[in-house]
Image (cartoon, helix red, strand yellow):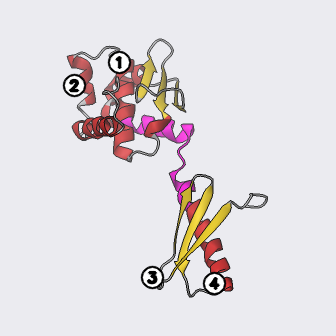
Amino acid sequence: MAGARKPVVEVRRSQRRRRTVSAYRDGERVVVLIPDQFSRAEESEWVDRMLARLAAREGRLARSDAELFARATRLLTTYLAEYGSQAVPASVRWVTNQNGRWGSCTPADRTIRISHRVQDMPDWVIDYVLLHELAHLIVPSHNAEFWALVARYPKSERARGYLEGVAAAAAVPALAE
């Protein structure tokens, strides 16, 4: 990318490392692990290569509001098609101000908000959280009819278990749905 600032890079050399090179982010810094016998030219070449790989990986992982809305549309078509426009949200977006729940839905204005904490979770968990909120556009409460809609998603129980595990690992009480 032209004009993009190069991050602070820390190169760690290892006498035990022979051929492999790896890199990871540590806050604002990128740590590159290389074999000790690499020359300065090889080091420079590998740092550039690993920065490019990290940028490509992070670009693939970035999830936008547009992608989230498209995902919601695919879920509607697959699991709630018979509800037509009743199940179509006005907006679906990532938010950073939801720390007590994974997502929320306001049926009155047809908006769905998904916590940024879900962004890095597996796709099947994101799909579950989205379908859960989409089902609220049809049934606002958590009654039997609502849970029957959510259960249409084949990985719903697995995703609920995953989310409960994340909440338990974070040593917080089970988060509200």
| Numbered range of the magenta stretch | 56-77
* Vertical side of 14 occupied by 135: above or below: above
In the drawing, what numbered circle is on residue 16? 3
Name the N-terminal-most of marks 4 and 2. Answer: 4
Report how far apart the C-alphas of labels 2 and 1 lie in the structure: 12 Å
Name the N-terminal-most of marks 2 and 1. Answer: 1
In the rendered image, residue 65 lying in the magenta stretch gets the answer yes
* Vertical side of 107 occupied by 58: above or below: below
Q: 161 or 75, which lies in front?
A: 161
Viewer-nearest of discs 4 and 2:
4
Name the N-terminal-most of marks 3 and 2. Answer: 3
Where residue 26 appears, as percent x and y from the top left, is: 55, 56
Name the residue carrying label 1: 138
Q: Residue at x 39, y 32 (%)?
A: 130
Can residue 76 be spotted in the picture?
A: no
Name the N-terminal-most of marks 3 and 4. Answer: 3
Label 4 packing within 10 angstroms: few (<14), some (14-19), many (20+): few
Name the residue carrying label 4: 42
Q: Residue furthest top?
A: 108
Q: Residue at x 63, y 53 (%)?
A: 28
- Secondary structure beneath dot 2 equals helix
- Secondary structure beneath dot 3 equals loop
Report how far apart the C-alphas of labels 4 and 1 lie in the structure: 59 Å
- Secondary structure beneath dot 4 equals helix
Viewer-nearest of discs 3 and 2:
3
Type of amino acid under label 3: Arg
In the rendered image, residue 119 lying in the magenta stretch gets the answer no
* Vertical side of 120 occupied by 55: above or below: below
Type of amino acid under label 2: Ala
Name the N-terminal-most of marks 1 and 3. Answer: 3
